[in-house]
Image: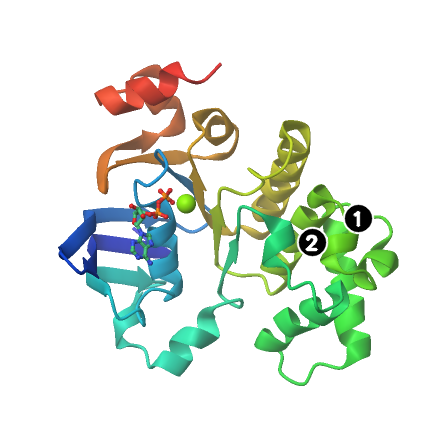
Amino acid sequence: MTTPTLKIDKLKLGFKTWSGTLEVLHGISLHIQKGERVALVGESGSGKSVTARIVLGMLQQLKSARISGTVEFEGTNLETLKPASRHALRGTKMSMIFQDPTSSLNPVYTIFTLFKEVLERAEPGITNELARQKAITALADVAINEPERVLDSYAFQLSGGMNQRVMIAMALANNPALLLADEPGTALDVTVQAQTLKLMSALVEKHQTSVLFISHNLGVVREFADRVYVIYKGNIVEQGPTADLFANPQHPYTRALLSAVP
Ligand code: ADP
Ligand code: MG
């Protein structure tokens, strides 16, 4: 078997509180092969977002977080990396798309400035001309047909659907090996969400990007994922190819989730 893009092994997370420790992840394991789209499905509060944040290295510096287990990215245990190398992976080899695109784009800067910052992570010192050219190509890939106007706008001047496309274009601009998509588009209306998921789907297909697709909605997951992990109160209770899971769910919680799919 080839080296997985992502391999999480017995990951535990707790948060220290004034009265003890709140255990959030109880030792979850999952892997994603190159080019595979894997969904992590579960109800609100089950531990999906914290898992993605640990992969990105965003919880490790939090004083209250207690983390154990291993996370390997392309065969490297992330704990063995120096903080600077680990930080350098973010936005380059792994990137993330969040639930609400408009509030994740800094309103103080134009889309071009934000885009250039993303490109600079992979190519420090990139010129404005080249950054603009690359941004325009990336925006065309997400079917934005007035890229110049969009680049000179601020996020608050654009629709939620447009911002979502911009986020997808930015997340994929440096051709990451791993895309973490945390409930992408749930802040948008259903038709816009469906369109942007289609776009994202075509792009990850084209670039063979591995994806961790986080969702509470099995209907969306059916469209998008090759394989599914079901997380319930911080435990993976079931996993398998999407079609198998839909045809023959094993865990009562999976059955309950399925009954909510129209
Ligand atoms: P979801 O599956 O909805 O994405 P999360 O991963 O965001 O759930 O959160 C899992 C649990 O961890 C929740 O109970 C949440 O309240 C708790 N949690 C998340 N982040 C923190 C934090 N920084 N401090 C304390 N508790 C947190
Ligand atoms: Mg979440």
Residue farthest along the bottom direction in this orientation: 125
* Residue on which disc 1 sits: 144
Question: Decide: marks 1, 2 in contact (CB < 8 A)?
Answer: yes
130 left or right of 262? Answer: right
Q: Amino acid at mark 1?
A: Ile
Residue 123: quarter of image: bottom right
Residue 19: quarter of image: bottom left
Q: Which mark is residue 29?
A: none
> Nearest the camera: 100 or 214?
100
Q: Amino acid at mark 2?
A: Val
Q: Is mark 2 within 8 Å of ligand 2?
A: no
> Nearest the camera: 37 or 117?
117
* Residue located at (46% from left, 31% from top): 221
* Residue located at (37% from left, 37% from top): 44
Q: Earlier in the sequence, mark 1 or mark 2?
A: 1
- Few, some or many residues within 10 Å of mark 2 (<14, 14–19, 20+): many
* Residue on which disc 2 sits: 166
48 left or right of 13? Answer: right
